[in-house]
């Protein structure tokens, strides 16, 4: 049996990342632990000083609504991203090799367009690099690389 894990992403604007990646992955903001109205309340309860917390509810986590896929925590950090990711997410929307390439490409382009409208940047298209593969390499609003395929 595997060991449960979450993906942690350093983030300058955790709330913005929550909104963007909820859209990108079909995830939802994770509610605060039972007994707390906001994540800010929870952070204060475990001793994080108020001056270290951003204003608002401190929503910085998302989850798969069905509970099958890993949770993601956008860990607030003061600095912005400066170098290429060593790990990236592949957002798989095409349906895979069993779907006609034209349809797969349309699905990828449609999802990528939604993400560009939400603040992502398209970097390059990968087509034919691997036979039967189509993907778009992108960056999220904070510059983290990911692929839509």
Image: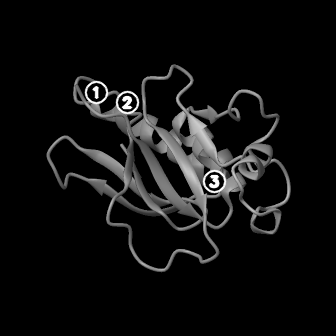
Relative to 93, residue 118 above or below:
below
Q: Which residue is at a point 50% across and 57% down the rendered structure image?
A: 9
Question: Relative to residue 138, is residue 40 depicted above or below?
Answer: above
Q: Nearer the viewer, residue 108 or 66?
A: 66
| Dot 1 or dot 3, earlier in sequence | 3
User: Residues under labels 3 and 2: Cα distance?
Assistant: 29 Å
Position of residue 73 measured from the top left corner of the image (x, y, whole percent):
55, 48
Task: Say what secondary structure mark 1 lies in.
Answer: loop
Q: CA distance from mark 1 to mark 3?
A: 32 Å
| Residues under numbered marks 2 and 1 in contact, where contact means CB atoms less than 8 Å apart | yes
Residue 56 in the image, given as x and y percentages of width and height: 85, 52
**Residue identifier under label 2:** 103
Q: Residue at x 37, y 56 (%)?
A: 88
Mark 1 neighbour class, 10 Å CA radius: few under 14, some 14 to 19, many 20 or more = few
Tell me the residue that label 3 is attached to: 17
Say whether disc 3 or disc 2 marks the residue closer to the N-terminus: 3
State which quarter of the image contains the N terminus: top left
Q: Residue at x 49, y 23 (%)?
A: 67
145 sits to left or right of 62: left
The residue carrying mark 1 is 100
Q: Secondary structure at mark 2?
A: helix
């Amino acid at each position: 049996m595997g060991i449960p894990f979450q993906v942690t992403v350093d983030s300058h604007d955790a709330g913005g990342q929550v909104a963007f990646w909820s859209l990108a992955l079909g995830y939802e903001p994770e509610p605060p632990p039972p007994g707390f109205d906001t994540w800010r309340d929870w952070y204060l309860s475990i001793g994080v000083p108020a001056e270290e917390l951003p204003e608002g509810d401190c929503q910085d986590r998302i989850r798969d609504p069905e509970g099958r896929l890993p949770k993601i925590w956008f860990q607030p950090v003061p600095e912005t991203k400066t170098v290429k990711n060593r790990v990236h997410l592949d957002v798989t929307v095409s349906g895979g090799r069993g779907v006609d390439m034209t349809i797969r490409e349309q699905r990828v382009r449609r999802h990528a367009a939604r993400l560009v409208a939400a603040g992502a940047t398209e970097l390059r298209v990968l087509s034919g690099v691997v036979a039967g593969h189509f993907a778009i390499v992108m960056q999220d609003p904070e510059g983290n690389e990911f692929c839509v395929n």
